[in-house]
């Protein structure tokens, strides 16, 4: 059975008209004779939307009972049995009620599509799963109902339903989206112009990406390799050289000339991975690309020009930016540069050759072979100078046992051995000297440079050519082997460093220890200073490092403009200094990660403060208004001249005013306490206190009407605490208990080693285990239920004050039902001194 087709109307925001667009499409198809039914359509009480659905057959909805409430959901079975050509399913991201066949409506749609029925549906941009976090950061509202992007991207058609922010806000103001009582709140919160503009841009970008994916699939299916310049996509070719920064900035300028431009930086490396740029330079280019808003890619290829152009065509790029050649003109005569090859083979891709400060600046000295080391190079030259002479002497002594072919082969063997030991240039000298000696001593006529036999001339020429070719190959293989060993050593060092750093808490310290161990140094450090006039500040160092060593250090590698990696000890080789670049780049990454973590912590703290302020405003606005309203009403009634109150009524009004004033006093006191705790301004003055006396004093001063019964005896040892702070703690805890339990609240105490425990027991509704920590958070009332008075500060203030006095507060279940708040404070007398370690305990069942 052929799978049905899915058409999705994507709304940039609620209220832009996606449901109306869906119904309009349904009406058009009905007019063409298509069998269209409504599976589910959410009009949200909008008269125009409801009128659009008139005349379209609506299938019955599935009735699901949940917690005594009957809910209606899409009936997939009814749709499949009816088998229309097209079914309308509104709100694709909807979450179905428990008991429905699927958890999400998009899963219902997927089943209908599998049955071969076409579906037209709707969804808003904020419900796409990949954009959930982005939308929350923009609007401050997290969408709980989401649909996977893959499902929407897999639709046969996605049509954007858009509207300008101003037009949408006018629709809201006219009551075309929400009821009148919700309009002001919606305009002031979710439907702000900035929010709507951001959501609109997200919608356009998401749809543009989908169009780009479709274009890519079409070009691949049709075998089209030419670039279709649908977007200003600029590819910048990087070699890892210093000119890369200039090329990136020029590429960013070109990409920014038009809307939707895209910058892609490409670093082409050899397939074998042996030839690479400096690691720290490549890392710096990667960071600059990110700062310019582009993406950094690394591709491998033996031919740099072919790999670059293949990548550019693969991403459908319109332009390639490449730097002017750094090679000398005579070098380009021998072999064309990458820029020339790219221009020659670019075809329909525009190539921008950018000049820079390093144009024609490469010096290409002839290398005599330092890659092999001084000892091997010296040994090679010894073989080149003495080997041919010694071999000629031996062959001359044993002339009766061999002839010219064997002699040529022996000299060729000597040339290859010289190449293996000393490299190319000693081997070439050996080959030249050997050809002359063979000609003088072993080719007729001897002791002259004349060659009488043409075959001998050919043999001697072949010998020279083979000797040079073999020497070049051997020399190249030795260099490549050395490069491979260096790359392997470098990769092993980086892999080991990365793996070991993953589990380290202090990654910078671990990295410095690795550097000391890897290079065999005395010490290492990361130092920083803003200018040369300031002293070095040590950000991290190993043992034995002295900041005065910075100037005389073996290596001082720059991490950025202010920070450097300093290594002290032996002098490093050139290969080691290349690896220093890897450690420098890793140190920069570690420091950058630490900065990001600090910024994230600051952002988290700011977000927490913002949530606290929001909760404070929401809670205080209600809890301040209520007692103020009672005070205002009571005072106004007492001042009224046209009403006569009895003494009892007057007393009730005065009592109401007094109770409301007490509530305000308690609320303001808690707010002040919380502000002092968050500002670190609480300084306890500890003294020796009797818990029994403090509990009795606090119980007598409570403004609530509940009963507090203390069962503590005089045997309960004294504690060390601040009396004022402890009274505030007990008052908040006891008032909280009486707020949730109208019966008797029991207070009992006991000594526990060096601590004294106070238990405040109520028989109220209790608190679930998962909420026992939540109740101590600011502005939290259990379940966020608006019952009772207060803004949820009492227990939060109590915990903060207990922490300040070196005490603890926690919550436990009361056996038989209820909640027990447990306070623990330091004991004034050690065990065995002062009061005996006994106490009466209250028992309950």
Image (cartoon, helix red, strand yellow):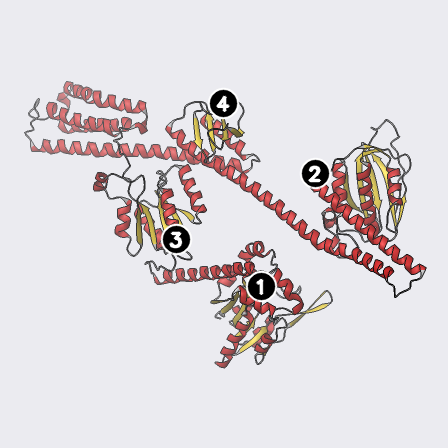
Q: Earlier in the sequence, mark 3 or mark 1?
A: 1
User: For residue 51, which quarter of the picture?
Assistant: bottom right
- Residue contact at pointers 4 and 1, CB within 8 angstroms: no
Residue 742, given in percent of the width and then of the height, sits at: 86, 53
Q: Residues within 10 Å of mark 1 (few under 14, many from 20)?
A: many
Q: Earlier in the sequence, mark 4 or mark 1?
A: 1
Question: In this orientation, does residue 209 appear?
Answer: yes
Residue 608, given in percent of the width and then of the height, sits at: 64, 47
Numbered badge on residue 277 = none
Q: Residues within 10 Å of mark 4 (few under 14, many from 20)?
A: few
- Nearer the camera: disc 4 or disc 1: 4
Image check: 505 left or right of 367?
A: right
Determine whether 99 is above or below 785 in the image. below
* Disc 2/disc 4 C-alpha distance (Å): 39 Å
Q: Earlier in the sequence, mark 4 or mark 3?
A: 3
Residue 712, given in percent of the width and then of the height, sits at: 89, 39
Question: Residue tagged by mark 4?
Answer: 548
Question: Residue tagged by mark 3?
Answer: 255
Determine whether 471 is above or below 622 in the image. above
Numbered badge on residue 680 = 2
Q: Residues within 10 Å of mark 2 (few under 14, many from 20)?
A: few
């Amino acid at each position: 059975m052929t799978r049905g087709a899915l058409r999705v109307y994507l709304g940039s925001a609620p209220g832009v008209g996606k449901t109306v667009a869906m119904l309009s499409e349904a009406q058009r198809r009905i007019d063409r004779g298509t069998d269209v039914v409504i599976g589910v359509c959410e009009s949200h009480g909008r008269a125009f939307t409801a009128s659009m659905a008139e005349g379209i057959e609506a299938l019955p909805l599935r009735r699901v009972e949940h917690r005594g409430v009957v809910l209606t959901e899409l009936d997939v079975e009814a749709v499949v049995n009816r088998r229309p050509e097209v079914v309308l399913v509104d709100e694709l991201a909807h979450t179905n009620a428990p008991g429905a066949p699927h958890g999400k409506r998009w899963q219902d749609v997927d089943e209908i599509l599998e049955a071969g029925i076409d579906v037209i549906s709707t969804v808003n941009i904020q419900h796409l799963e990949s954009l959930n976090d982005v939308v929350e950061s923009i609007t401050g509202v997290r969408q709980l109902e989401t649909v996977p992007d893959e499902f929407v991207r897999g639709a046969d058609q996605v049509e954007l339903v858009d509207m300008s922010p101003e037009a949408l806000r006018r629709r809201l103001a006219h009551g075309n989206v929400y009821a009148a009582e919700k309009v002001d709140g919606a305009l002031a919160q979710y439907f702000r112009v900035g929010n709507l503009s951001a959501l609109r841009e997200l919608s356009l970008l998401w749809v543009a990406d989908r169009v780009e994916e479709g274009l890519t699939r079409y070009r691949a299916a049709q075998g089209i390799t030419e670039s279709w310049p649908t977007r200003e996509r600029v590819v910048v070719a990087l070699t890892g050289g210093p000119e890369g920064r200039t090329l990136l900035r020029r590429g960013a300028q070109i990409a920014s000339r038009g809307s939707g431009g895209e910058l892609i930086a490409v670093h082409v490396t050899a397939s074998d991975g042996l030839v690479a740029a400096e690691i720290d330079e490549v890392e710096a280019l990667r960071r600059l690309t990110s700062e310019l808003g582009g993406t950094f890619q690394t591709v491998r290829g033996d031919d740099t020009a072919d790999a670059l152009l293949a990548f550019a065509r693969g991403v459908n790029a319109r332009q390639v930016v490449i730097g002017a050649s750094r090679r000398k003109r005579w070098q380009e005569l021998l072999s064309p540069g990458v820029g020339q090859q790219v221009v020659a083979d670019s075809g329909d891709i525009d190539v921008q050759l950018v000049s820079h400060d390093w144009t024609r600046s490469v010096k290409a000295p002839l290398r005599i072979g330092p890659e092999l080391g001084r000892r091997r190079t010296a040994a090679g030259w010894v073989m080149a100078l003495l080997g041919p002479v010694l071999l000629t002497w031996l062959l001359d002594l044993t002339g009766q046992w061999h002839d010219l072919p064997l002699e040529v082969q022996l000299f060729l063997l000597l040339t290859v051995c010289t190449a293996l030991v000393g490299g190319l240039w000693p081997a070439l000298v050996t080959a030249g000297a050997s050809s002359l000696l063979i000609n003088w001593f072993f080719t007729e006529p001897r002791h002259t440079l004349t060659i009488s036999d043409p075959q001998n001339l050919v043999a001697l020429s072949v010998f020279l050519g083979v000797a040079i070719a073999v020497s070049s190959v051997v020399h190249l293989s030795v260099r490549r082997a050395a490069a491979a060993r260096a790359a392997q050593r470098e990769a092993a060092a980086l892999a080991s460093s990365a793996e070991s750093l993953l589990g380290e808490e202090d990654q910078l310290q671990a990295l410095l220890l690795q550097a000391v161990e890897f290079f065999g140094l005395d010490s290492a450090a990361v130092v920083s200073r803003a200018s040369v006039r300031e002293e070095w500040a040590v950000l991290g160092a190993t043992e034995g490092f002295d900041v005065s060593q910075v100037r005389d250090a073996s290596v001082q590698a720059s991490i950025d403009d202010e920070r450097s990696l300093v290594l002290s000890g032996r002098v490093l080789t050139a290969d080691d200094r290349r690896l220093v670049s890897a450690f420098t780049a890793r140190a920069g990454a570690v420091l950058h990660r630490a900065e990001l973590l600090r910024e994230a912590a600051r952002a988290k703290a700011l977000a927490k403060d913002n949530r606290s302020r929001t909760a404070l405003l929401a809670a205080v606005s209600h809890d301040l208004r209520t007692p103020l309203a009672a005070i205002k009403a009571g005072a106004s009634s007492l001042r009224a001249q046209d009403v006569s109150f009895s003494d009892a009524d007057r007393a009730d009004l005065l009592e109401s005013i007094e109770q409301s004033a007490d509530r305000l006093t308690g609320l303001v006191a808690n707010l002040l306490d919380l502000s002092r705790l968050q500002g670190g301004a609480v300084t306890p003055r500890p003294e020796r206190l009797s818990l029994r006396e403090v509990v009795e004093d606090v119980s007598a001063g409570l403004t609530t009407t509940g009963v507090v019964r203390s069962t503590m005896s005089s045997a309960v040892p004294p504690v060390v605490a601040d009396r004022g702070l402890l009274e505030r703690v007990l008052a908040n805890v006891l008032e909280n208990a009486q707020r949730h339990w109208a019966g008797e609240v029991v207070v009992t105490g006991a000594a526990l080693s060096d601590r004294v425990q106070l238990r405040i027991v109520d028989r109220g509704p209790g608190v679930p285990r998962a909420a026992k920590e939540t109740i101590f958070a600011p502005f939290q009332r259990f379940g966020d239920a608006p019952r009772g008075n207060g803004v949820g500060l009492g227990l939060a203030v109590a915990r903060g004050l207990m922490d300040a006095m070196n005490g603890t507060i926690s919550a436990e279940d009361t056996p038989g039902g209820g909640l027990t708040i447990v306070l623990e404070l330091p004991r004034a007398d050690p065990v065995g001194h002062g009061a005996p370690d006994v106490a009466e305990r209250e028992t309950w069942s």
